[in-house]
Image: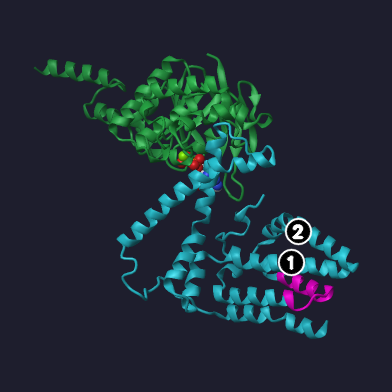
Amino acid sequence: MQKVIEFKHVSYKYPFEEDYAIKDIDLSFYEEEVVAIIGSNGAGKTTLIKHMNGLLKPTTGDVFVEGINTKKATVAELSKKVGIVFQNSDYQLFAQTVYDEIAFALRNFGYNEAEIKERVKKMMDYFSISQYEKSSPILLSGGEKKRVTLASVLVYDPKVLILDEPTIGLDFNQKKNLKHFISRLKEERKTIVIVTHDLDFVSDISTRIIVMNRGQVMAQGDPKDILYEEDLLKEANLMPPSIVKLAKGLGLNDRILSFEEMLQKIDNLLLRNV
Amino acid sequence: MFRPEYFYFRKKDTIIHRLDPRSKLVYVIAMFVWALIRGDLLFLSAVFLLTLIPISLGKLFKNLLISLRAALFFIVLIILINYVFSHNLSLAIALALRFMILISSFLIFSITTSPDDLALALYRMGFPYDFVLTFNLSVRFIPTVMRDATNIIDAQRARGLETQKGFINRIKNYVPVLIPLIVVGIKRAINVAESMEARCFGASKKPTTLYELKFAVKDYVFIAFSFIPTIFYFLL
Ligand SMILES: Nc1ncnc2c1ncn2[C@@H]1O[C@H](COP(=O)(O)OP(=O)(O)O)[C@@H](O)[C@H]1O
Ligand SMILES: [Mg+2]
């Protein structure tokens, strides 16, 4: 697999702060993977991802995006490759209509109006928000806003898509829809990075998990290894996903993360007991 | 670029931070008077040097340097204009020093006084509670609003907004930043108002306070210190 983003000994300190927000980060992100970055509040997750499109430049160390040092490129150049959808939709929605909101990035990147129209329409279809084309994005519901913000980044087709706390403020159905979109993007072979402390959400869609705590990477690896490490999660102030609690409660030895697999397993157990 | 964090309260434990806000208020007002009362180089240099004592006691040298550097343009401008019109270099420098005294003494007040203490001081000085609270809330939320602004700018730059290129561009680009800032601000204001009402704000016209302010010996000393320039005034 091709390496897309690389962190080399990256530390970052916000101006006027005493402590480093992230410390000595060494990480790589590859094509076609779905990486979950998990960690409690203040662990440094958002600070980390702001380095991936050059919004923050390392205090020490270097970040490379497709081999280019982020210190030598503009945020706009890097953003074309690495799209970030931030946690709070209210921090970005500003346009008069949903159409203009989604077209914003394309206009900044200098696409012509015909191409913009085609792409925006496609996105509105993709996220089922066509009926809001002329509505104000600010007045939509939480889940609809999230879809507009996703569309407004995906519209320019970045190679890497980063979602910061995408599930916050979403109800059950909206989360399910979001998961569905992510699975579709996964099939389109994008690199997806999901930042969250909602382990239920990422347990069955991620291919790799990175655990952060106090600005450092505590562990990384296969979801089955990470999410079944109770002590590790406890140390990082995280709740294990419900499916892990269920498996442990049932006394299962297999590390199951998918719902279907769990159903199968429970079915077998019941059959055996009949 | 203007960075309000240079002037904003930072929690630290120094004798200046522990002073009663009222004595610091007296100090700032006295310093402003001293800065304006005379316009000659000798007197103003002495007053400026005197402000360096609380600056060093409060560990504020770095803040002062950063603020002076930010104000450098105006300092140079004051010197140039006054020199051009008066051909009197010492007067021109004196007027710049006057400006620096204002910066330095205001810094001593603003960076070492927590908004809560200041509000309490104003309340005790007889300002109406509503006024004091509004004042306190607006000061307290400065860091929050600043962080909002940073996050909004980041979110828009991540979608290709250029914030660095050209003057016209910059003004045009305020729109995608200002609108979310206002929306988020209004939402927060509504939240704060609701949670205050839910906790019976306004039930009593004269609410009690959690802390009481008390003048200590150091406060009297500090106020006396504010009047040391009287000596300069008559001697220099
Ligand atoms: N703009 C900022 N200025 C100063 N400190 C910040 C800023 N943003 C975040 N921090 C601090 O950096 C640390 C990491 O924050 P963050 O990256 O937002 O964590 P997370 O996204 O994991 O919750 C925290 O201690 C936080 O207070
Ligand atoms: Mg965060």
Q: Quadrant of the C terminus of chain A?
A: top left
Q: Label 1, label 2: how many angstroms apart (C-alpha)?
A: 9 Å
Q: Position of residue B231 (x, y in %)?
A: 76, 84
What chain is tagged by disc 2?
Answer: B
Q: Do the residues bearing badges 1 and 2 touch, measured as CB atoms within 8 Å? A: yes
Q: What amino acid is labelled 2 in the image?
A: Phe
Left or right of residue B33: residue A202: left
In the rendered image of this protein, does residue A269 appear above or below residue A48? above
Look at the image and name its color scheme. by chain
Q: Is residue A12 above or below residue B11?
A: above
**Picture quadrant where residue A111 is located:** top right
Please tell me whether residue A197 belongs to the stretch shown in magenta: no
Within 10 Å of disc 1 (Cα), the crowding (few <14, some 14-19, many 20+) is many
The residue depicted at 40 percent of the width and 72 percent of the height is B209
x 63%, y 39%: residue: B163
Which chain is in green here? A
The one nearer the camera, A232 or B51, is: B51
Q: Which residue is nearer to you in this view: B159 or A103?
A: A103
Instruction: Please identify the dominant SS of the magenta region.
Output: helix
Q: Nearer the viewer, residue B172 or A257?
A: B172
Q: Colour of chain B?
A: cyan
Residue at screen point 72% across, 69% down = B101
Is residue A203 at least partly visible in the picture? no
Q: Which mark is residue B74?
A: 2
- Residue B98 screen position, x and y as percent: 75, 69
Which range is magenta?
B35-51
Asked if labels 1 and 2 share a chain, the reply is yes
Q: Earlier in the sequence, mark 1 or mark 2?
A: 2
Q: Which mark is residue B99?
A: 1
